[in-house]
Image: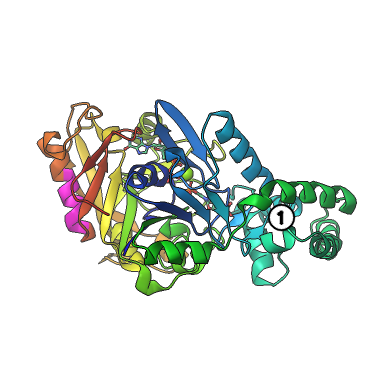
Amino acid sequence: MSTVVLIGAQWGDEGKGKVTDFLAQQADMVVRYQGGNNAGHTVVARGRTFKLHLIPSGILHGDKMCLIGNGVVIDPAVLLQELDSLESQGISTANLRISPRAHVIFPYHKSIDMAEEEQKGNKRIGTTCRGIGPAYTDKASRAGIRVAELMDREELAEKLRDALEAKNKLLARVYGSEVQFDYREMLEQYNEYADRLRGYVDDVSILVNRAIDRGQKVLFEGAQGTLLDLDHGTYPYVTSSHPVAGAACLGAGLGPTKINTVVGVAKAYITRVGEGPFPTELHDRLGDHIRERGCEFGTTTGRPRRCGWFDAVIARYAARINGLSYLAITKLDVLSGLDTLKICTGYRYKGEVINEFPAGLKVLAQCEPVYREVPGWREDISGVRRYNDLPQNARDYIERIEEMAGVPVALVGVGPGREQTLVLQNIF
Ligand code: GDP
Ligand code: IMO
Ligand code: MG
C-alpha cells in the first residue's frame, strides 16, 4: 500500500501543483478531495505553463488516473473549459473521473458569494467569488445539488426549481440584489453540461480503494492550505472546506488506515491572498521585492499576494494538525541575493513568548514575531539539480527549517519547472 496525501502547510499557493506534478511521475492515480475552482495550481512542464483549477495536476502525464472526489465542489462550466483547454493542447483527459457525490456550483452561488462580500464591506473575507462558500453552505444545509442529481433530468428539473425559487428570493430580499435567474435558461444550460460530463462520472471511492488494494500508488492533491481550513485555519478568514490531510479520507471515500504518508508543501517564505491576520507580513520594500521575484500574484484571481518571512510556529502547527511525514520546501530560489534571512521562531504576545499558534484572531493580530536571523546566499540556485550542490548557507537555511518545524524536508524547489526539484528523500 502506497498512499501519499499532499497538503498546503501555509495559506495556500505553496506550490502544490508543481509538487503534485513531480510526485505524479511515480504515482498511478491523483485525487482531488476538497475545494473547487478557488484553487489555482500551476504546473510548468514540457516548457509550457498550465494553470489547473479543478482537474488534478497529474493530468499532464497522460497515463495517470485523475479523480475528483465527493468532497470537491464542481463548477461544470469551469470544468468543461478546463477539459477543452487541455484537449486543445493535445493533453488527453480520458483518464478523468468525477464523483457523483460531489456538489455542483450554480451561478447563484457566485452571486451570493459576491453579495455577501459586498455586504460585509471592510469585514469581507476576500474570497475568490467563485461561489465556493455558498455551495458548501447548501451542502451542509442539505439544499445542495450533486453530480448524481445533475445527471438525472427529472431530479435536476425539480431540485433546480426549488433552489432557484429560494435563491432568487434571497438575492432580492436579503441582499437587495437585482440579479434574478431564469429557471428554463439555467435548466437547459445545466442539462447541456450534464450531457457533456456524463462519461466522466464514476464511483471515486470504489476506484481509489481498488487501486490501493491492487498495490497502486495513489497521490491525494490538497487545495488551499492548513491556515485556510474551516476548523483549523484563521477563522473566519478561511475557505469553506477542509484543506487538511484528514479530509482526504472524507473527500475521496477511504478510511484513515489507508493513508501512509503526508507531505506538507511550504514556501521558503510565506504568502497570503485575501484578508486576515498574518504575523510575519512584510509591509516594506523587502515584501515588494519577494512579491516581484517570486511572481506572487494569484493564479485564480491575479490579486497580489501578501508576503512575509517563513513562520516556524505555523510550520509546527501544520505538522501537528496534518501529521506531516515530510515537508516539501518550494521557491528557495526566490530568496537568493538577500544578505540576511529571518525565520519566525515564536510570537511575543503581551510581553510573553508563545510557541503555539493561537485560536483567537484578536490574539493572533497582536502577536509580534520573534525572529532568528540567518545568513543568506548570493548565488542563483535555479540551475542546481542536487541538494549538495546548493550553497552552504542555503542548506543551512533548509536545515534550520527542518529543526524548527520538527519535520524532515524531502524536496526542495529551486524553480517552477518539474526538473527544478531537489530530492533529499524518496516519498513514494
Ligand atoms: P498552488 O496553488 O499551491 O499549486 O501554488 P500556485 O501554483 O498557485 O503558486 C505557486 C507559484 O510558484 C506558481 O507560479 C509556480 O509555478 C511557482 N513555483 C512553484 N515552485 C517553485 C519554485 O521552487 N521556485 C519558483 N521560483 N517558483 C515556483
Ligand atoms: P490554492 O489551492 C490561496 C483564499 C481566498 C480567501 C479565502 C476564502 O491555489 O492554494 P474562498 O473563495 O475559498 O471562499 O476564499 O481563501 N483562498 C486561497 N488562497 N490559494 C488558494 O488555493 C485559495 N483558495 C481560496 O483568497 O482569502
Ligand atoms: Mg494556487
Report the magenta residues as a range.
397-404
- Residue 103 in which image quadrant: bottom right
The answer to whether residue 150 is magenta is no
The answer to whether residue 403 is magenta is yes
| Overall secondary structure of the magenta section | helix
The x and y percentages for residue 293 are 36, 29
The x and y percentages for residue 286 are 33, 34
Position of 262 with respect to 165 (left or right) is left
The x and y percentages for residue 346 are 26, 60
Position of 407 with respect to 245 (left or right) is left
- Quadrant of the rendering where the C terminus is positioned: bottom left
Find numbered disc 1 in the image and state the secondary structure of the residue it sits on: helix
User: Which quadrant of the picture is home to ligand 1?
Assistant: top left
Q: Would residue 382 be seen by someone viewing this image from the given angle?
A: yes
The x and y percentages for residue 255 are 42, 73
- Quadrant of the rendering where the N terminus is positioned: bottom left
Which residue appears farthest toward the front when viewing the image? 214
- Viewer-proximal residue, 186 or 234? 186
| Residue behind label 1 places its C-beta within 8 angstroms of ligand 2 | no
**Residue located beneath label 1 in the image:** 109
Q: Is residue 403 above or below residue 19?
A: below
Q: Would residue 268 be seen by someone viewing this image from the given angle?
A: no
Q: Is residue 245 above or below residue 39?
A: below
Q: Residue at x 18, y 28 (%)?
A: 378
Task: Categorize mark 1 by other alpha carbons within 10 Å: few (<14), some (14-19), many (20+).
Answer: many
Q: Residue at x 26, y 61 (%)?
A: 325
- Viewer-proximal residue, 339 or 60? 60
- Residue 319 in which image quadrant: bottom left
What type is the residue that disc 1 sits on?
A: His
Number of callouts: 1
Q: Is residue 299 above or below residue 37?
A: above
